[in-house]
Each structure stands twice: as C-alpha cells, then as structure tokens.
Image (cartoon, rainbow, N blue to C red):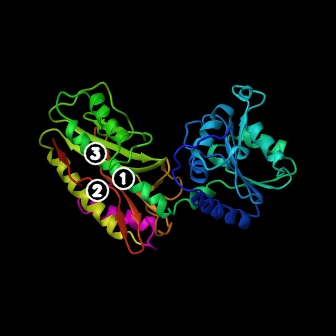
C-alpha cells in the first residue's frame, strides 16, 4: 500500500544538501557512520518534528548510502513516513516490548540496525553528550566491540548554524507570527484579565499564524508579571493583571520546527521612572549590538557593544546577550557573550536576548531575532521596540 505523505516542509534536494555537508565532515573525521540522536538534528536532516524523543530514536547516516535510516518506536514510524522524505525501507520501527524494558531497549534496536547496515566493524560517530547517557554509551561500546567509536557531539549543530534561503523563508514566516502574537498581547492584557485568559488569546494567534502561514507547534512561553518580573522562565499563573502591573513576555512563532524569538515589556498604566530608564538603556544597547553585526565580527563584539552602551546608563546585565536560534529555539553552539570568538557568517541567525533580571523583584525584557547578511544585519522580528503602555 502506498502511503500519501503529508506536506513536506522542504524538498528532498534541501535535505540532500544538508546530508552532503554532514558527510563531508564525516569524511574529514574518517567516520563511516554517524548516529544522530538529537531531535533537532533529526528534524534538520530528515524533516521529522513529531514529539517522540522521550524514547530512543536515531538517524543513522552511512557514508556509503545516499539516504539515512531512521530507527524509532514502531508507533511513531507512520509519522516519520508522513513528515520526512524517507521511504519505507529507510524507516525502521522497533517493537513495543522494548519500551519500559530494563534489560533491552530502543538503543539495542539502533545497535541492531548498525549491524544490519554492515557498519558494526567501521568507524561510528555518536552524538555522545547530546542525548546519550553514560550507560548507553557503554552499551554501544560493548555491543560494537570492533567499531571505532568517535565523539561527534554538536557536529550537526555547527553545520546547521548557517541557514539556507529556504530555511530563512520559514524563519521569516515564524517571525511574522511572533510579531502578531506580541501585538495580540497588547490587545488583551488589561486590568482584571486573568493571565491564563490573555495567554489563551496569544496562543490562538501563535496557532492561527500570520499572512496565511499557520503556526505548526508551540514554543515555550514565559509570562512574568508583577510581582514576578525578576524571574526569567516561568509560565502564566492563576493571577489577574492589575493597574500598575508590569509584564515581561517571551514567545516565538514556530513553523515546521523553526522558531523566531521575541521579548517585550508591558506596563498597565504609567510605567515607573526606573522601568523607563531601563527601557531607554536597553533599546540603545540593542541598537548598538545590531549595528555591530556583520560577517567577520564575533559574538563577543556584539555582546561588548551592548554591554558598553548600557553601562553608560549605569546598568549591567549578568547573563549572555543571546544565542543562535533556529530549530526548536536554542542551538547549543555559540553564545553572544564576552570572550566568545565565534565569527559571524552570512545567514547565521541569532536571538539577541536582552532580558535583564536586575533584582529578585524587578527585571525587563526586550529581544529580536536577526540574520547576518553579506554586509550587516536583517532583523526578522519587527514589533515596535517600545515599552507598551496599556
């Protein structure tokens, strides 16, 4: 029976391009097979975004085969066939008796697959630190005694930092959804409104999308309102917005796994002088940071431009100023912070995250998602850079 695949986020040629880049890296490392565990990297190389990474799954890339083999729980195999470019022979579902089994699990199925692909005696690269517990690494070494095990952690993460034009199109769509959600927040945050009710409206926008492009999933939302504005990563509560409340909101539109983060600060009623001063400093720092972005500049250059600017206003920020963003939000590679000498390249994308948690009971939030261009910067998010007074 022929399965009618779902809508593909990208054409097969795009995935072949990405796989070619990975195989080139494998050749430099003299790796015959790369076993990819990280869910975002599987999405990058095959298009799979279903939520099944809580059980073992892996994409096995052979230097000697054009297409990878995806080994995952049998109940999730149909989702892989719908979402990815892979055909039946390259999607292998393992039996349910490997779930919740202390003796033998899905990692055994992945190792069996390596044997069946004729790679058990070759050089095998593993994403070791990403999603691989120490006991599982020992299992791979024990069951592949003739293989040369190579640590290839973050190999794919670094490759995917530079986005293709097709990826950037998706990220612009996600950014438009982010902007729409911020503007919806400005519409619905009012005195007497429950936080949960405001969030329901915001989530509705994130799902409905913008410009005819729907949100295909939800990224984490942080809503930190008075008296919790000194927090960074908490969700909405049972509380109600009040006159004088400050609200720090972080969210992001999501399209086919790709995210565009944005943060804005809202004040119900006239904001305090302190909040106004912090806003002025942070916007000036944001603009200084963006003016630093160009190929060849470093993540450290961006951070230092921001930090120097806000220090001129008598303000400091302890946390980093951002990070690469793309699939499933954070890409764990570079950091926009002092001392990170990662050089910017065209089509790298970052979340310039300037949330500043100053005291236990006071903080402020503003951010943009941007792309490095051939000569400077393209800011993908475009909601007004203002302190929203409601």
Q: Are marks 2 and 1 in contact (CB under 8 Å)?
A: yes
Instruction: Using the numbered discs, state the Cα–Cα distance from disc 3 to disc 1 in whole angstroms.
Output: 11 Å
Q: Is residue 180 above or below residue 30?
A: above
Q: Quadrant of residue 298?
A: bottom left
Residue lying furthest left:
270
Quadrant containing the N terminus in the rendered view: top right
Tell me, for residue 372, which label it has, or none.
none
Q: Indicate which disc, 2 or 1, sits on the residue closer to the N terminus.
A: 1
Residue behind mark 3: 182
Mark 2: secondary structure = loop
Q: Give the extent of the magenta segment.
A: 295-317
Magenta-drawn stretch contains 330: no
Q: Residues within 10 Å of mark 2 (few under 14, many from 20)?
A: some
> Going by the image, does 191 lie left or right of 81?
left
Q: Residues within 10 Å of mark 3 (few under 14, many from 20)?
A: many
Residue behind mark 1: 175
């Amino acid at each position: 029976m022929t399965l009618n695949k779902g809508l593909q986020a990208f054409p097969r040629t795009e995935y072949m391009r990405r796989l070619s880049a990975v195989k080139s890296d494998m050749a430099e490392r003299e790796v015959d097979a790369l076993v990819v565990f990280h869910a975002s990297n599987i999405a990058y190389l095959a298009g799979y975004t279903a939520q099944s990474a809580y059980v073992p799954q892996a994409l096995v890339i052979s230097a000697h085969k054009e297409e990878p083999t995806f080994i995952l729980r049998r109940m999730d195999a149909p989702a892989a066939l719908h979402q990815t470019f892979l055909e039946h022979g390259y999607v292998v579902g393992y039996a349910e008796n490997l779930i919740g089994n202390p003796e033998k699990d899905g990692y055994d199925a992945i190792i069996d697959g390596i044997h069946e692909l004729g790679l058990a005696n070759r050089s095998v690269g593993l994403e070791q630190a990403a999603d691989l517990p120490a006991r599982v690494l020992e299992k791979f070494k024990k069951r592949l005694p003739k293989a040369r095990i190579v640590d290839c952690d973050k190999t794919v993460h670094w490759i995917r930092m530079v986005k293709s034009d097709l990826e950037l199109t998706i990220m612009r769509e996600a950014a438009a959804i982010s902007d729409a959600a911020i503007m919806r927040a400005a519409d619905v945050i009012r005195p007497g409104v429950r936080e949960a009710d405001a969030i329901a409206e915001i989530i509705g926008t994130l799902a409905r999308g913008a410009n005819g492009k729907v949100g295909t999933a939800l990224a984490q939302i942080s809503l930190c309102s008075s008296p919790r504005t000194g927090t960074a990563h908490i969700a909405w509560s049972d509380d109600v917005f009040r006159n004088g409340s400050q609200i720090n909101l972080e969210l992001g539109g999501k399209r086919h796994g790709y995210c565009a983060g944005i943060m804005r600060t809202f004040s119900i009623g006239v904001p305090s002088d302190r909040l106004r001063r912090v806003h002025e400093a942070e916007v000036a720092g944001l603009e200084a940071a963006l003016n630093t972005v160009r190929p060849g500049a470093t993540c450290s250059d961006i951070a230092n431009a921001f930090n120097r600017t806000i220090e001129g206003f008598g303000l400091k920020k302890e946390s980093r100023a951002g990070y690469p963003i793309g699939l499933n939000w954070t890409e764990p590679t570079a950091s926009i912070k002092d001392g990170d000498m990662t050089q910017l390249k065209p089509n790298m994308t970052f979340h310039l995250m300037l949330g500043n948690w100053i005291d236990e009971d006071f903080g402020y939030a503003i951010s943009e998602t941007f792309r490095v261009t051939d000569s400077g910067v393209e800011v993908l998010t475009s909601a007004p850079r203002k302190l929203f007074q409601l």
